[in-house]
Amino acid sequence: MVKDKEKVPFEKAIADLEQIIEKLEDDEITLDDALRHFEQGVSLMRACDAHLKSAEGKLRELLKGENGEFVEKALGIALESLDNGEPADE
């Protein structure tokens, strides 16, 4: 189990989750192993969620205007359309 939700780096937690999914998809896995892996996966998912909420909070803080109101700003990241690789319409 992950004790402190943000101690596991986000990228490692995602990689570990991918490995757990592969193990759970194995037809030969025992019920006990499946439950153990599922519990680990839930713990890792919560750690990832904590990382994402922390990052969201940092972004919100960075985007807060002088008067304390949140200011909507473009971050300079061009979103690509999934269809043809062209920049998305804004």
Image (spheres, rainbow, N blue to C red):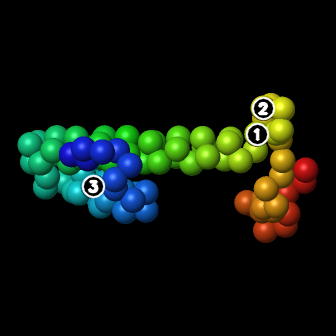
Disc 1 marks a residue whose amino acid type is Lys
Give the percent coordinates (x, y) of residue 67.
Answer: 84, 32
Quadrant into which the N terminus falls: top left
Q: Closest to the observer: 12 or 15? A: 12
Q: Is label 2 or label 3 in front?
A: 2
> Which residue does the image show at 90% across and 53% down from the upper left?
89
Image coordinates of residue 23 in percent, x first then y, are 23, 57
Q: CA distance from mark 1 to mark 2?
A: 6 Å
Looking at the picture, does residue 14 appear above or below residue 56? Answer: below
Mark 2 or mark 3, earlier in chain:
3
Q: Is residue 22 above or below residue 46?
A: below
Q: Residue 77 in the image: x percent, y percent?
A: 78, 61
The local secondary structure at tag 3 comes to helix
Mark 1 and mark 2 residues within 8 Å of each other at the beta carbon: yes
Q: Is residue 76 visible?
A: yes
- Dot 1 alpha-carbon crowd within 10 angstroms: few under 14, some 14 to 19, many 20 or more: some
Left or right of 54? Residue 89 is right
Q: Which residue is mark 2?
A: 68
Residue 64: image tag: 1
* Secondary element at image label 2: loop
Q: Amino acid at mark 3?
A: Ile
Circle 2: residue type = Gly
**Are discs 2 and 3 less than 8 Å apart at CB?**
no
Which residue is rendered at x = 73% and y = 60% of the image? 82
Q: Find the distance from the CA under tag 1 to the CA under tag 3.
A: 39 Å
